Amino acid sequence: MSDNLPLVLVVDDEPDMCWVLQNLLAARGFDFRIAQTGEAALKLLESSRFGIALLDVKLTDIDGLDLAKQIKSLESAIRIIMISGYYYKDDVNIQRAVEEGFVSGFISKPFLHDDVIEMLHAVCSR
């Protein structure tokens, strides 16, 4: 891992999506941890300090936006990027999350690999 790249938390309940993000992040030199539930993500936050979280909006155990709020309350400096095939960037819920400051970016599924990398670098540079 490069010293200037943040540790990334990936939270998605779809194993295939986790696999894609895992390989994409590893190929770009990011260190990361994977959680397939909100509960598992919160446990990882107890033992690691993450700089960025990639969160699916629809999880099996908790709404991704609710999880984003919980994560921000535990780690205020973390930057959260929501990923969704259900919501769109201009959705009122996503816009409100960005305005309230607990979400730093949004990526629609399906996405291009470059979309994820560009968003990560944009969020890292803020």
Image (spheres, rainbow, N blue to C red):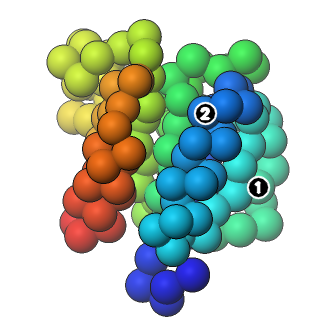
**Decide: marks 2, 1 in contact (CB < 8 A)?**
no
Q: Nearer the viewer, residue 46 or 109?
A: 109
Residue 65 in the image: above or below residue 77: above
Q: Quadrant of the N terminus?
A: bottom right
SS for tag 1?
helix
Residue 113 in the image: above or below residue 32: above
Regarding residue 100, the answer to whether it shows in the image is no
Q: Which residue is mark 1?
A: 44
Tell me: 96 left or right of 40. Answer: left
Query: Mark 2, mark 1: which one is toward the viewer?
Result: 2
- In percent of width and height, residue 46 lies at 77, 60
Instruction: State the separation of the CA atoms marked 2 and 1.
Output: 19 Å
Residue ID at (44%, 63%): 77
SS for tag 2?
helix
Residue ID at (51%, 54%): 24
Instruction: Please state which amino acid type lies under the numbered disc 1.
Output: Leu
- Single out the residue that lies furthest toward the bottom: 3
Q: Few, some or many C-alpha atoms within 10 Å of disc 2 (few <14, some 14-19, many ≥20)?
A: some
Residue 79 in the image: above or below residue 18: below
Tell me: 1 left or right of 38. Answer: left
Instruction: Please state which amino acid type lies under the numbered disc 2.
Output: Met
Regarding residue 37, the answer to whether it shows in the image is yes
- In percent of width and height, residue 32 lies at 63, 62
Residue 33 in the image: above or below residue 65: below
Residue ID at (60%, 70%): 31
Mark 2 / mark 1, whichever is N-terminal: 2
Label at residue 17: 2
Tell me: 66 left or right of 85. Answer: right
